Amino acid sequence: MSFANKLYPNVPSLGVPLYQSTLVSENNSLTDGANTVTISSISPTMRAGRMRYKIYNGAGTSPAVVSVVVTVTDGTTTELVHYFYPNAARAISSTGWIDWTFTFISELSVNSVSIVVTLSGTSETGKLDFEVSPGSTGNS
């Protein structure tokens, strides 16, 4: 179940909106415990934008999301830009999933973005789609 509607941010320009490319990592397999997906070698680097993740197709015994952590880096410094720690683990299935979009601003010239999804349950699996839409370049 890849993204049907992609993020397309409007970047301010003179008269005509500029659409930046969206970086997408889809259909990533998740298993029990912590799962990391990284979109790296982002060029040009970015300082702001929007991100979206979808966690879906949970299978196994009681698959649930315990946490989601998103970080950005310039290769030297790492910055936390989003976290999701529900009071109770959020169940996922083929008909119930998490789909979250958020904006971010960083002081870094970001060239890599990572998401860590932690699942709980017994022999559970799931899928992750993750996309990044730069809103401004690291040179701004």
Image (cartoon, rainbow, N blue to C red):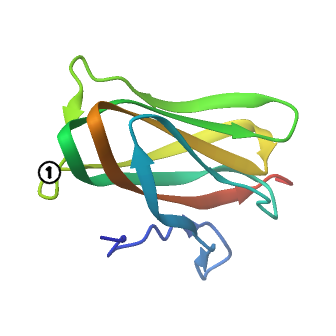
Tag 1 residue: 96
- x%, y% of residue 99? 30, 51
Task: Check the image and name the residue furthest to the bottom.
Answer: 16
Q: Which amino acid does the dot numbered 1 rest on?
A: Gly
Q: Residues within 10 Å of mark 1 (few under 14, many from 20)?
A: few
Q: Measuring 62% from the left and 74% from the top, which residue is drawn there?
A: 21
Q: Measuring 55% from the left and 67% from the top, which residue is drawn there?
A: 24
Left or right, 35 with reference to 79: left
Q: Secondary structure at mark 1?
A: loop
- x%, y% of residue 44? 82, 63
Q: How many marks?
A: 1
- Comparing 75 with 12, the one in front is 75
Image quadrant containing the N terminus:
bottom left
Q: Measuring 36% from the left and 71% from the top, which residue is drawn there?
A: 2
Left or right, 21 with reference to 5: right
- Comparing 74 with 56, the one in front is 56
- Comparing 103 with 16, the one in front is 103
Left or right, 140 with reference to 129: right
Above or below 68: residue 135:
below
Above or below 81: residue 98:
below
Task: Check the image and name the residue furthest to the front.
Answer: 123
Q: Measuring 34% from the left and 73% from the top, which residue is drawn there?
A: 5
- x%, y% of residue 53? 41, 52
Task: Check the image and name the residue furthest to the top.
Answer: 87
Above or below 118: residue 8:
below
